[in-house]
Image: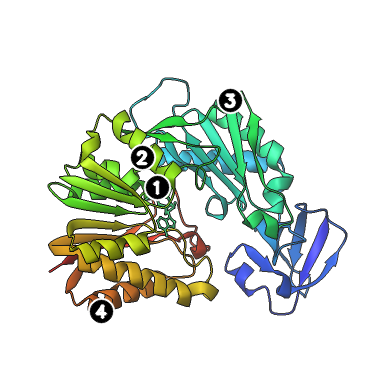
Amino acid sequence: MADLVLKPGREKSLLRRHPWVFSGAVHHLNGDPASGETVDLLSFQGDFLARAAYSPHSQIRARVWTFDPDERVNPDFFQQRIRAAIEMRETLGFACEWSKGVQRDVTNAYRLIYAESDGIPGLIVDRYSEMLVLQSLTAGSEYWKETLADILLEETGLSSIYERSDADVRALEGMQSIALTIRGPELRSPVTINEDDLKFKVNLSGGQKTGFYLDQRQNRLRVRELANGRDALDCFCYSGGFTLNALAGGASAVVAVDSSAEALALGRENVSLNGEQAERVEWREGDVFQELRKFRDEGRSFDLVILDPPKFAPTAAQAEKASRGYKDINLLAFKLLRPGGLLVTFSCSGGVDAALFQKIVASAALDAGVEAQIVEHLSQAADHPVALHFPEAAYLKGLICIRK
Ligand code: SAH
C-alpha cells in the first residue's frame, strides 16, 4: 500500500479525527496509487495516522476511511459501515421494512447514507420508496462503487439503484457526470413517496438534489403544526413540500413561488395527489427577489412566510455576497408579515454559520422596521446526522420568528 506522508505538524486535524487531508499538508507520496485507492497517512515522523482514499485531482487529497491501524479497507469494512448506517435509521424510527408493500403509509423516503457522517466519505444514498438513489462524489467512493452498490442491495433487500452522480463537485475530482440506472429495471420517473401521511411525486432522474429535499422533513412538519388559519407565502417552494404541509395544517390559502416551471408543475400534481383543493394554492413562476417586491408594492400581507432559498454561499469565500441576498429576502419578508405573523427562514449555505445567519435576520428586521422574536432554531432532519468531528456536515439552519 502507498503512504502519504504529511508535513511536520500537519497531523493535528487528523489527531482530532477530522477526516480530510488538504494538498498543502502533504509532504510526499511513497508509491503510485491510482485514483481512489487506499493509502496510509503517516506523520512526518512516520507514525500511522489513518487509512484513507487518495484523490489525486482534488484539493482534498485524502479522505479517511479508518483511524484504526488494524482495520482493513475491503468489502467487509463497507458492509459494516452500511449496516451501522441502516441500524441508526431504524433507531430513529424510519421504516426499514424493505419488502414491497410493507408499511405503505409511513415515511419511505429518507437518507440512508450520509457520507462522512456515516463514515463513508463521498457516498450519499437516499431511499425513495423501493428505489435507492446513489451519489458518488469522490475518487474513493467511485473506486468502491460497484462493491458499495452490491452491499446496498444485499443489506436492504431492494433491487433497484439509480445513480445521480451529476453534482458539480465531481469535476473537482476529475470525474464525469453520470445519471443512470445501475441496478434493477430501468427507472420509471417520477416515483411516488410517502412523507408522514402526505404523498409526493418525485422526479429522481432530473429533479434537484437526488429528487427531493429530504433534509427539510422535520421542518415541514413543524410548519404544518403552526399553519392553522394562516394565510401563507411559500418562497422557493420547489414541488410544494412546505405548501402541502401548510394546507394539511389548515392554512387558509398558500401562495407558492419558484423559478422552476417543472417544480411548480409537480407541485400542482402533489396538491391533487393529496386530495387538496387546487383553489387553495396560487402557484407563481418567478424570481423570489422580484416577486417579494411586487407583493410589497401591491400592499399584500401574510401571516406565515417561508423562505427556503438555494445555497447562496457554498463556501465561506462567498459569505459576504450571500449575506446580502439573505438580508434582502428576509427584510422584504418581514415587511409582508402581519403583526403576530410567523417567518420561517432558512440558509443551507455551508459558508454562513448559524451565528452569522441570525445576525443577518436581525439586521433585516431592524431595517424593515419591525420587532420580532426568535421562537425556534431549526436544523436538518435526523437522517442527515453530523459526525462530531466533521461539523461541516451541519449545513442547514433555520429560525422561526414571530413579528410583534
Ligand atoms: N422548500 C423546498 C425546497 C427548496 S429548494 C422543499 O421543501 O421541497 C430551492 C428552490 O429555489 C428550488 O426549487 C429552485 O428552483 C428555487 N429557486 C432558486 N433560485 C430562485 C429564485 N431566484 N427565485 C425563485 N426560485 C428560485
Asked if the residue at label 1 sits under 8 Å from ligand 1, the reply is: yes
Q: Residue 159 carries which label?
A: 3
In primary-sequence order, the first of circles 4 and 2 is 2
Give the alpha-carbon distance from disc 3 to disc 1, as whole Å.
29 Å
Q: What element carries label 4?
A: helix
Residue 196 spot, x, y in % from top left: 31, 36
In primary-sequence order, the first of circles 3 and 4 is 3
Q: What element carries label 2?
A: helix
At label 3, counting other C-alpha atoms closer than 10 Å, the crowd grade (few under 14, some 14-19, many 20 or more) is: some
Q: Is mark 1 on a helix, strand or loop?
A: loop
Residue 11 spot, x, y in % from top left: 67, 73
Give the alpha-carbon distance from disc 3 to disc 4, as whole Å.
54 Å
Q: Which residue is drawn at 40% across and 22% down?
A: 102
At label 2, counting other C-alpha atoms closer than 10 Å, the crowd grade (few under 14, some 14-19, many 20 or more) is: many
Q: Which residue is drawn at 64% across and 35% down?
A: 180
In primary-sequence order, the first of circles 4 and 1 is 1
Image quarter of residue 354: bottom left
Q: Which residue is drawn at 45% across and 42% down?
A: 262
Label 1 sits on residue = 238
Label 2 sits on residue = 267
Q: Which of 86 and 278 is in front in this view?
A: 278
